Image (tube, rainbow, N blue to C red):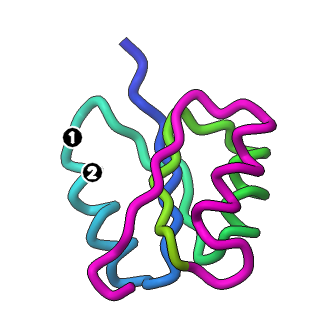
Amino acid sequence: MEPIRVLIADDHAIFRRGLCALLSAVSDIEIIGEAATGDEAIAQASVLEPDVILMDLQMPGFNGIEATRRKRLTAVRRSSALRSPNG
């Protein structure tokens, strides 16, 4: 079975790194990219074509909700918005 390809979008680098470390320990998950803004998340998702995007709700540029709406128009398989403890 192919791993689930995940893009992580959060403006807090420490939170992103921690989430990457946690998810990288799962054999069925492959972290394919990280983004610090909604704009970066949309751009990376268009190129990387992840199965799942984990996106913070409050980020610079497009917030996570708006970025998720825009990305859904270009058909990612799954997109989840999350709120980091800092936001």
What residue is at 49 percent from the left and 39 percent from the top?
52
Q: Amino acid at mark 1?
A: Val
Among the 4 quarters of the image, the one containing residue 63: bottom right
Magenta stretch: residue 36 in it?
no
Along the line of sight, the residue nearer the viewer: 20 or 42: 42
Label 1 neighbour load within 10 Å: few <14, some 14-19, many 20+: few
**SS for dot 2:** helix
Q: Which residues are magenta?
A: 59-87
Along the line of sight, the residue nearer the viewer: 55 or 65: 65
Among the 4 quarters of the image, the one containing residue 40: bottom right
Which circle marks residue 23 in the picture? 2
Is the Cβ of the residue at disc 1 closer than 8 Å to that at disc 2? Answer: yes
Give the position of the N terminus as an image quadrant: top left
Report x, y in % for residue 45: 69, 48
Report x, y in % for residue 87: 39, 85
Q: Is residue 9 left or right of residue 71?
A: left
